[in-house]
């Protein structure tokens, strides 16, 4: 009788142990795929960062290359002079201490020391990092404004107005999407 029970139960145990080991294999496969995906992501980020720092001349960069470096939203702002919607940017309320660099080329553009709350819904600074931000006359949309661009890659950052706080009385009104914040 004992032998009969063992005989009956044996296939059941074999079946269970097989399904457990199959389950483990599947899990391991899923994990390794996940690892692979994570590795691919970090590698692509690294390659883009490497690309940014290794580019010496931004004046002849093709639109295709810009589309690889930037997201669609960043491309619209930096390369097509777009404007992000007020109060939607990542850095509008950022009060951390650090440097705001260009999203396109990593050039240091603004310091958190000169950031102030303008209430406009865009990150605002009363001064720029000298030599790295260029003012350009902008008469589009029937308005006389001064556009500010990155001096290195000529990417559009925003506009500068004369209603800022002391000591400069300037208000650099900048799109968060044009910036990459590096905390001190
Ligand atoms: Zn730039």
Image (cartoon, helix red, strand yellow):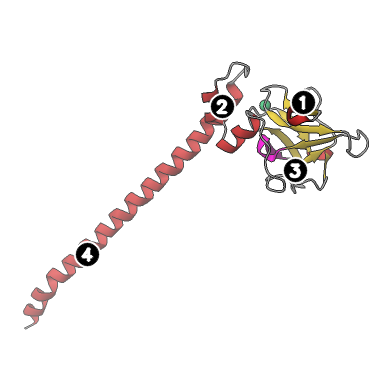
Residue drawn at the location 61% of the way across and 33% of the way down = 76
Question: Where does label 3 land, which residue?
Answer: 122
- Residue 84 placed where, x, y %? 67, 41
Q: Is mark 3 within 8 Å of ligand 1?
A: no
User: In front here: 171 or 32?
Assistant: 171
Q: Secondary structure at mark 2?
A: helix
Q: Which residue is mark 1?
A: 139
Separation of marks 2 and 4 at Cα, in angstroms: 54 Å
Residue at position x 69%, y 40% from top?
176
Which residue is tagged 4? Answer: 17
- Helix, strand or loop at label 3? It is loop
Q: Which residue is mark 2?
A: 66
- Say whether disc 4 or disc 1 marks the residue closer to the N-terminus: 4
Cα distance in 3D space between marks 4 and 1: 75 Å
- Marks 2 and 3 sit apart, C-alpha to C-alpha, by 24 Å
**Upstream in the sequence, badge 1 or badge 3?**
3
Ligand 1 positioned in quadrant? top right
Q: Are marks 2 and 4 in contact (CB under 8 Å)?
A: no
Q: Tell me where residue 48 appears, x and y as whole percent.
A: 54, 30
**Cα distance between the residues tagged 1 and 3:** 21 Å
In this orientation, which residue lies closer to the viewer: 124 or 7? 124
121 sits left or right of 40 in the view: right
- Left or right, 99 with respect to 46, comes to right
Mark 1 or mark 3: which is in front? Answer: 1
Tell me which segment is drawn in magenta: 175-183
Structural crowding at the residue carrying mark 1, measured as other residues with C-alpha within 10 Å and reported as few (<14), some (14–19) or many (≥20): few
């Amino acid at each position: 009788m004992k032998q009969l029970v063992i005989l009956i139960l044996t296939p059941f145990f074999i079946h269970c142990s097989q399904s457990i080991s199959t389950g483990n294999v599947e899990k391991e496969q899923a994990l390794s795929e996940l690892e692979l995906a994570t590795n691919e992501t970090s590698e692509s980020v690294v390659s883009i960062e490497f690309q940014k720092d290794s580019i010496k001349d931004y004046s002849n960069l093709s639109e295709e290359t810009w589309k690889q470096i930037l997201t669609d939203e960043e491309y619209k702002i930096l390369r097509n002079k777009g404007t992000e919607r007020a109060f939607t940017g990542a850095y509008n309320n950022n009060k951390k201490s650090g440097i705001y660099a260009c999203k396109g080329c990593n050039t240091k553009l603004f310091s958190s020391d000169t950031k102030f709350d303008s209430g406009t819904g865009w990150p605002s600074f009363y001064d720029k990092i000298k030599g790295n931000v260029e003012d350009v006359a902008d008469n589009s949309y029937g308005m006389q404004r001064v556009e500010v661009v990155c001096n290195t890659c000529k990417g559009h950052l925003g506009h500068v107005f004369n209603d800022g706080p002391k000591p400069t009385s300037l208000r650099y009104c900048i799109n968060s999407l044009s910036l990459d914040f590096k905390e001190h």
